[in-house]
Structures are given as structure tokens and as C-alpha cells.
Image (cartoon, coloured by chain):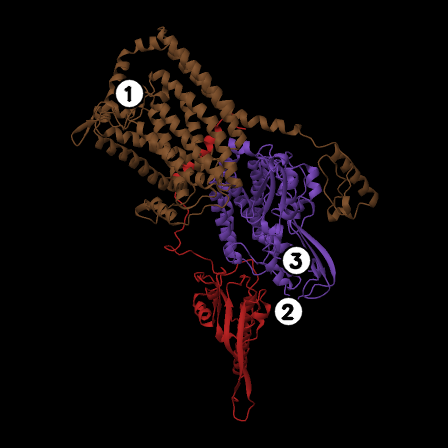
Chain colours: A red, B purple, C brown
Amino acid sequence: MSPVPGHGLAKGLAVTLRTMTRRSVTHQYPDAAPHLPPRSRGVIALFEENCTVCMLCARECPDWCIYIDSHKETVPPAAPGGRERSRNVLDRFAIDFALCMYCGICIEVCPFDALFWSPEFEYAETDIRELTHERDKLREWMWTVPTPPALDPGAEEPKEIAAARKTAEKLAAAQETAAQQTETPEGGA
Amino acid sequence: MTETTVGIGGAAEGTDMVLNIGPQHPSTHGVLRLRLILDGERISHAEPVIGYMHRGAEKLFEARDYRQIIMLANRHDWLSAFSNELGVVIAVERMLGMEVPERAVWTRTLLAELNRVLNHLMFLGSYPLELGGITPVFYAFREREELQNILEEVSGGRMHYMFNRVGGLKEDLPNGWLGRAREAVADVRSRMDVFDRLVLGNEIFRGRTRGVGVLTPQTVHAYGVSGPIARASGVDFDLRRDEPYLAYGELQDTLNVATRTEGDCLARFECLLEQTHNSLDLADACLDRIAELPPGPINQRLPKVLKAPEGHTYAWTENPLGINGYYLVSKGDKTPYRLKLRSASYNNIQALTELLPGTLVADMVAILGSMFFVVGDIDK
Amino acid sequence: MITPAVSSLPAVQGLAAENLGVFGRDPWWLIIVKAIFCFAFAMLTVLFSIVWERKVVAWMQLRIGPNRHGPWGMLQSLADGVKLMLKEDLVVKGADKVVYILAPIVATIPAFMAFAVIPFGPANNEISIFGTRTPMQLTDLPVGVLYILAVASVGIYGVVLAGWSSGSTYPLLGGLRSTAQMISYEIAMGISFAAVFLYSHSMSTSQIVATQHDKWYVVLLPVSFIVYIVSMVGETNRAPFDLPEAEGELVGGFNTEYSSIKFALFMLAEYVNMVTVSAIATTLFLGGWRAPWPITAFWAGANHGWWPLLWITIKIQLLLFFFIWLRGTLPRMRYDQFMKLGWKVLIPVSMVWLMLVATVRALRNENYDFQRIVLYVGGGVLALLLLSLVVDVFRDRGRREPAESGAPGDRFDPMAGGFPVPPRPGQTLPPVPRRRPRGERQLVNATDTAETADKEQEGDNA
């Protein structure tokens, strides 16, 4: 207990009085857009050109909020005399954001990089049924997807970059050996 | 013949009044319900009625694979999502005998401590609010906002991080994040004294909490109460020290388990405040270590279908609110056969039946607030 | 005792008699104008102070506060009022209808009535309205302050009746708390006024302000002032004494079951009461309409004409700010602590203080010279005593608590009734088998663990 009675009350009153003179920390949201980090899980964007209708996302989704419809199409053979190929064509890709738990498992499992997180968050609706967003809307959100942030220096290289680097190195090595090979015969001559 | 009915109802039964606190009462943080029998303003009988938010988490776990469980498990106690995820992945890793990369261990420790600070700040703010002081909660939320930004930057989520994976973390830290995290921790620490001046030193606050709702160590043991509430009653038990998991074994110098012996509301609040300070120190220590670590992976390459081998294990962690345990029984499938959840609030809240009788309605609010519970954690 | 006092201050007494003669001579239209002015002044102050409160509390909480309605959010309370009027008006099934509807009216009307005797300016016909010279006060009574006390206590009946007539548990508790609050704080309030009467020789408000031309009573009677400030916060049900409402405990207290315009009336009554008690505090202790000291030193006209209206408004606003400041900082007191503060601290202290003031007045009438010193020293001592008593109220609780112990301890059967149960009060617990850290456990054999468990049990029992 403080030695002087009422000391604690006075201290508290001083805190609030001092705070009163400070600037507020409020961000006036609709007037000032919030700054969100690139990893922010706002909405799921679909890059439908990459989608092969493998249904992995719909199957892995813990609350089954992804709806996919597709049909098969036969593609005429690329070269004359070749075989006909069948291809899956996406008819519908919808995510019910009223059910979505924003876990990101669908994005993680997508083997063809067709799904991405976007920090976009302004898609509230007045009717819960309108929260099921179809492929055109999901495709539009693709434009808001930011580039992923650079990683900490202590981190392992991301596997995409590692793979790209490996092929680049291989290519460079191949070029070098090719150059050497062209050089060697010259030197021999 | 005339028939006379004599009403003696009220007079014969005394003047007890049944008062329903909740499920929508402002001081129950959600949908806890207390059925009180009052004699004047004094409570003669209290019965917590739970289950208004039961979501069947344990049953849902049985139909989800281990990655999906992480996402479900971080929701039962929405204020300590990271620690909840942690228990699940530790259990699965133990079953698999999987070794987690050092970088992941330290980062998990760091995020767990930041999560602890976030959780405690919530209660440091909301407890004075329940006692009628409307301002501290806003100061607490300013600090929470700062730390949430840090966690959002690394995990993408502000409350449900979904950042743990079996064998490590989802992805590595963004560039420059360590520096920003350090800044945020320093900022929060520099302003933490506001709770000392505005709340703890206040005579009215002390008058409302000192000697109110004394929880004896015996009751703590009897009901399985844990966490800061148990430590405020002198039960010195903290898994971070007594059964170190993650990197806590190497943090013993920094780790300081806050204990009190009084067991009243004030002691509980003081424990929480002290623990918040300590968690900030721990976070700093983790940041130091992560900066020194050699470059390396932050997760393990997992098989396409992750199956825990047949067997069972119990993984418990010191969550912000107390001991959180997962008893995992696997039959070798990709889903668990059973995943029992031992949540901290469920046990803590049961001590209310002992604490409340004999107190005033106003004390009820003080005690309820000082039990630091999350309704989702009670009802699962 | 009064007679020598009268003889010692003949001039003041004469003035008083003259002043009260001034009242009640207005033409009927002027009375209506003044009444409307009093009402409008209270309403406007309320409208302003609601916005002001929300702004100030927001600043204290690092927020901005209302800023959408009108310039700087000034029309926020108007918008709130309109919203409340348009809401659905519910009457609870179990309510006592007549009383239920009457209660908000009973709470609101007396809140305005006290304004009739608040002097907004000097009583010697300083201003002229449409060519009629008149005092800046609706009316005055020889027992003006008693009238205020009477009206204020009627207002609290509104709260009590609302709590009772709602036929619901939370409002009932709120109403009961309000009753106790009213009884205990009116006494302290009344006694703090009595010290003022001893100095002013009058209960009429204009006379009380007139006698403060030299020194305000806040300087002469600091203890009375503190007691009044505390009890006025208690009377208006404001934080930290907002027990009848106590939104964290009783949801809304007495107004839980009210909605729409009836709820609006309660809100209005609360804020008008705040304005009223601030006006009373200003009148009785802070020199009423008088300009503060440094201004009067260089500006002789400060207390004449329409200017007094400005000073009293400023003083009322400062007191309102004090209310808001308290609300933004302090947690709520507990009901029994609040009662203890009223009965064991405020009432005894103000009684002793009243005796002291009376003694000093008597000595002064005997022309003793050291009375000033006695007053100041005694005042200081009493102010300290008051504060330390407040502290004691909170302190002794901790000591009393451990005396309670449970029923005689019988043996604890952990499986009573066939399922695991916790011990009842008084029963002791069997030893808790504690797990040891994993590394340590392998080194310890079974007998060792048993022994340590026994030791732990002994420790627990001790």
C-alpha cells in the first residue's frame, strides 16, 4: 500500500489526464486504408488458368466450403494421327466464405499454384447466402495478391527458388562445358 | 361449505431469490451461466451451468487429419491459439518420433510467449473493466494491437494463427521480422507500467480484490486448477519449468515462475501481471537465440499422407490459462482414434462452486473475472 | 447562538432581508421566460455534457470519440435522443404498470426543479429583460437549500420505484442499493450543508453566494466541500459509486427492463442531476456566479451585468469534467464498502467538523482572535483523518477473512456416491501424487517416490 492515502487514486487520475493530452491511436478505417502484411489471410484468390480440377482443395478443406463442378472435354490430337486426349474443364469454383475458417489448407495443398491468399478483406455482405463467391469474383481477387515477402537471412531457401537456382546452375554449367568444348578443339588446332 | 386456501409460500421458504447470471451477462465473457441463490445480496449457493458453446471439438478431431486438427484445435481457447496448436503437433511429433529443427523450436517458443502476452493483456484489461474501470482495457488493446501486427506479419492471422505444422512451422520468418518483433516487445514493455499505476495501485481496486475469493491450495489440488490461478494460491507448478518442452529447458535463467500465497483475486491479478513481464523477457531471450542460430530449415518434409503410428501419448503444455493437454490415441490411421482435450478453463471454472457461496454479488463479478477463463475453453 | 451572530453581521443580515424582497415581484411573463431559461440551460448543458463526456473519456482511452454527427460530433447526443425515442417501447409482463410508467417521470421532473433556486447572477436587479429589471434567478426561498434537498430526494424515488416495479431480479437489486445509498448519503450531504449555513446565516441560495464575496466556502470549509463532493457523486449514481446501475454486475441495474423514451428519461435524469449537483456545489462552496480571484483583481465589472452567467457555467463545466474524469479512471466500489464509507467515515467526520465549525463560530462571536488558526489547523487534521479512514475501510477486510473455517473435518471419501468428487469444506485431501520431471524420474525408485509423496502430504497438512 502506498504510504499516503489516496496516492493510488491520484496516480490513476494522473495517468488518464496525461493520456488525454496524447494523440489517439485510432485509425479512421474507411478514410484511411489499413496496412496489411503480404501474408495476411484476407480472402482466397483463384488463378483459374492453373486449375486442373484435381479436387484436392475441396477434399482437404476441413469444413467443405469449396464447391467445384467440372466436365470432361475431349481435345483433338495435337499432331495428326495422334491420340485424342480428355481434359477437365472447370465449370464452377465457389468458396462459401460464411463457412470458411481461413486456415489456408486449400492453398497449401494445391499442387498447381492455383490458389493464393490476398489481404483484401472488404467483401462483407448483408445476406449470408451472398457470401458464396463464384470463380469470376475469386479470379478478380487474383489482382490483389501481393508478392510473398523475402525470407529471413537465417532461413532455408524456399524450394521454388532452390529448384530454379539448381536449373540455372545446371544450365550455366552446361553452357560452360559447351564453351570449354568449343574452346578445347580450337586450342588443339 | 367455504374452502379457504392459505398461502404461506414466500414466508415459509424464506426470502431466497434465484438469480441467473448469464448466459448473456456482460461479466461472463460469452455464454457461461451461473445459477445463484441469493440471500439479500449474499450468495448462498452457486452452480455454474456450462455447455452453451459446446461444439464437439473432440468428436470433430476424430474425423479430421492432423493438419486439419491444428486448425480446429486453435479455436477452443481463442485467446491462446498458438499454444493450443502446439499441444497437438507435439503429441503427433512424439508419436512419430520426429525431431523438430532447432530453428523451429526456438521460433515456436518465441511465438508461444508472444501469444501468452497477448492472452494476459486481454485479462489485464478486462478484469478492471468488470470492476467498473473502463479505461485500462483500451491500454491493453493498444499493446495487443502491436503484438497482433507482429504475429499477423509472420503467420497471416491475428488470432487463429494456424502456423504450426507437424515437424515445425508453416514457413520461415519474413526478412526483418526479428527486428520489428524486438521493437514491438520493447514498446509493449515500456508501457506496461500503466497497469501498476492505473490499476494495481488503485485503492478501490485493491479494496475490491484483496481477501476476496480466497482459493486454498487444497481446493486447487482437488479441482485440478492450474496456471496463474493455481500459482496465486501457492501451488508452484509450471510445466515450462517442471517438465520443460520446446526450448524452455535452456531458458531456465530467464524463466521466472510468478507465485503468490494469498490466493485471492489480487494475488491472481498480480501473478498475471508478473507473468506478462516475464513472458516479454522470455520473448527477448528467444529473439536473441534465433538471431544466433545457424541457417537451417524450419520444418520437416512430410509424407503426402501423414499417419501417426499405433499407440497413445499425452502431451501437455503450459498454456496461458493453465495446463492444456491432449491425449492422443492412434490406430495408425490418418485421423486419430481419439483425441481427448484437457482444457485449462474447464477445470479452473469448477472451483467457482467453492468460491462463490458466502460472497456478495459484487464479489461474484470480481471472482469470476479473476478466474481468467475463456468460455470456448470450458465448453470445448 | 444565532442572536450574537446576527448582531455581529448586521450589514449582511440587512442585505439578505432586502434581497429576498427582490424575488417574487416579476411580471408573469418574465417568470415564464426565466423558467424556460432554467429548463433550457439544464437541457443544453446536458446535451453538451453527454458529447463532452464521450469525447473526454475517449481521449483518456486513446480514442477519438464521436465525430460523425455535426461539426466535431456535437450533435451526437441529439442523434442518440432521436434514436431512443424511435425505439420499441417495451413494458415487461411482470411489471406493475402504473408505477413502471410513473418511475421515469418521477426521476426526471425533480431533477429540473432544483434549478429554480440556483442564482445565475447577483440579486440586486442588475439586468433588464424587455425593460424590466430583475435578478438573475428564478426565485429564492428563505429555505432554498432545504428545498433543493427535498427535491433531490424525491428524484431518487424514481430509481427505487423503477427497480421495484420492473418485477425482475436485477432491477430489484439495483433499486435496493439505491435506497440504501439515498438514506446514507443524504445525511452526510445535509451535514456538510449545515456548516455552510453556520457561516452564511441563511439557507437562501442568493444569500449564501452573497456572503462569499470575501472568501469562498471551499477555502473556509474544506472538509465540508470534500464530503459534499463525495456524496454528490454518490447521489447521482456516477462512477465509482454507480452501484444501482453497475453494468458489470446487475447488467443495467434499475433500468435493465426499460427501453425507448422511458430509458431516455432515466438517462436525462442522471445527467440533469449531475448538472444540478454541480450547480449546488458551485453555489454553496465555489462562490456561485462570482468570477475567480485573479480576474476580479484587474476587472471590476466581472461580477456585473450578464458576465456572472459565464462564470457559473465555467464552474459547472469544471465540476462536470471532474465527474467524467472519475468515471474514466476509477473502478466501481463494492456495495458494503460504499455503505461503510458513508456511515463510518463521511457522517462521523462531517459531524465532528460541524461541531468544530460551530465552536469556532461561537468563539468568534466572543471575539477570540485565534479562531482562524484553530479552524485551519483543525481543518487540515480532519482532512487527513478523513483520507486515512477511507484507507482503513479497505484495509481491515483482509484481516478479518481468515477467521472463517469450515465444518468439522470428517474423512474424505474421494469416490463417495460411486464417482469422483472433490472434498467438501473442512475435509482434507489425500496426498497428490506429483509427477517428477522426466529426466529425474528414471533415477528415483519406487520407495523414494512414496516417501516424498508422504512428505508432501505432511507439508500440505501443515
Instruction: Give the distance between the C-alpha atoms of the residues marked 3 and 1, in whole angstroms.
Output: 77 Å
The spot of residue C230 in percent (x, y) is 44, 28
Q: Secondary structure at mark 2?
A: loop
Which chain is home to disc 2?
Answer: B
Position of B255 compared to A25: left or right? Answer: right
Q: Quadrant of residue A142?
A: bottom left
Position of C287 compared to A98: left or right? Answer: left
Q: Residues within 10 Å of mark 3 (few under 14, many from 20)?
A: some
Q: Secondary structure at mark 1?
A: helix
Determine contact: label 1, label 2, CB under 8 Å.
Answer: no
Q: Among all residues in the image, which is located at the extreme front?
A: B1
Residue at 62%, 45% in the rendered image? B48
Q: Which residue is mark 1?
A: C210
Position of B323 compared to C443: left or right? Answer: left
Can residue A8 be seen here? The reply is no
Q: Which residue is mark 3?
A: B58
The spot of residue C416 in percent (x, y) is 77, 43
